[in-house]
């Protein structure tokens, strides 16, 4: 389903901020890689940090001072919690991967174990828990220092920009009122799960209107950091349209 829906998206030439550009059309990205691009595509601070780390040629996954910086950033993002770092989502033990809910940037913490989606597409996977469990005695699997550097910068950018989690779009909120969608912070979901065929139809509706929606219902729509008046009106109309 995911690849089938994404195949409807024309080839992307470049991405900037919250928008994707093809040869002939611009799309507002409401998928944002499931939350990994919640700060936008190539945010300036992260891009600058990546260039600085790359100039030091720190590509091999050897111990580096970026490891300590990354762990400190995680401790600020999840104060008082235990966490285990995995090189990728696939490296997480299946029991955790299949049973643990996802946390995305700017979501409220509910005190339960989560798999954290960190705010960069190359970020490692992190299991966060309230208590010190046997999983927290796993040996961390850290990626390249370059990846740690840009992920750390992105985490600090999330911590320093709470306003990103409180985007105000009046017409969007009006469209959501009493409709099939519900909003929690940046995130918009259907109140009730729809059949896969219905989601595929919704995906095409959004795409035709100039928006990239999540290819599956597993991920929520993520409101961008800003919209033009025309884009906000078009998004409100998409959300208001009958199912």
Image (spheres, rainbow, N blue to C red):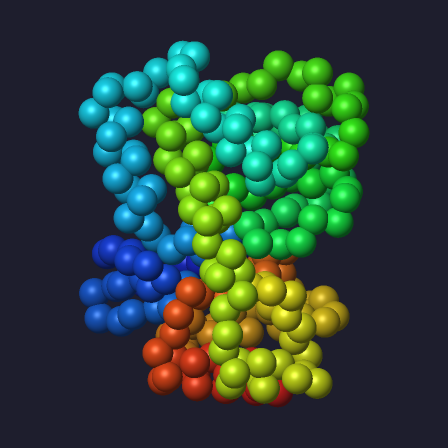
Residue 30 visible somewhere in the drawing? no
Q: Quadrant of the N terminus?
A: bottom right
Count of numbered labels shown in the rendering: 0
Horizontal side of residue 45 vs 198, given as left or right: left
Residue 208, picture quadrant: bottom left
Residue 121, picture quadrant: top left
Above or below, comparing residue 166 to residue 150 in the picture: below
Residue 13 visible somewhere in the drawing? yes
In this view, the residue in front, 73 or 175, is 73
Q: Quadrant of the C terminus?
A: bottom right
Q: Residue at x 38, y 79 (%)?
A: 231
Above or below, comparing residue 137 to residue 76 in the picture: above
In this view, the residue in front, 153 or 233, is 153
Horizontal side of residue 34 vs 138, given as left or right: left
Q: Residue at x 53, y 60 (%)?
A: 165
Horizontal side of residue 222 vs 181, given as left or right: left
List x then y, in percent, for residue 218.
63, 55
Q: Residue at x 42, y 28 (%)?
A: 148
Above or below, comparing residue 81 to residue 32 in the picture: above
List x then y, in percent, for residue 234.
43, 83
List x then y, in percent, for residue 68.
48, 21
Q: Residue at x 25, y 27 (%)?
A: 54
């Amino acid at each position: 389903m995911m690849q089938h829906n994404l195949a409807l998206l024309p080839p992307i030439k470049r991405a900037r901020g919250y928008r994707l550009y093809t040869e002939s059309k611009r799309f507002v990205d409401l998928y944002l890689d499931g939350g990994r691009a919640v700060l936008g595509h190539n945010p300036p601070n992260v891009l600058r940090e990546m260039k600085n780390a790359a100039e030091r040629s720190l590509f091999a996954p050897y111990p580096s001072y970026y490891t300590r910086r990354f762990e400190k950033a995680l401790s600020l993002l999840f104060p008082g919690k235990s966490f285990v770092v995995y090189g990728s989502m696939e490296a997480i033990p299946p029991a955790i991967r299949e049973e643990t809910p996802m946390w995305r940037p700017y979501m409220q913490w509910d005190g339960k174990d989560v798999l954290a989606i960190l705010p960069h597409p190359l970020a490692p996977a992190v299991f966060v828990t309230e208590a010190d469990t046997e999983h927290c005695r796993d040996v961390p699997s850290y990626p390249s220092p370059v990846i740690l550097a840009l992920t750390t910068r992105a985490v600090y950018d999330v911590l320093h920009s709470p306003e990103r989690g409180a985007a105000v779009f009046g017409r969007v909120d009006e469209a959501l009122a009493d409709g099939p969608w519900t909003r929690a912070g940046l995130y918009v979901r259907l109140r009730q799960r729809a059949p896969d065929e219905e989601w595929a139809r919704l995906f095409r509706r959004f795409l035709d209107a100039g928006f990239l929606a999540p290819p599956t219902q597993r991920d929520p729509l993520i409101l961008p950091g800003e919209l033009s008046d025309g884009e906000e009106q078009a998004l409100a109309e998409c959300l208001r349209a009958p199912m």
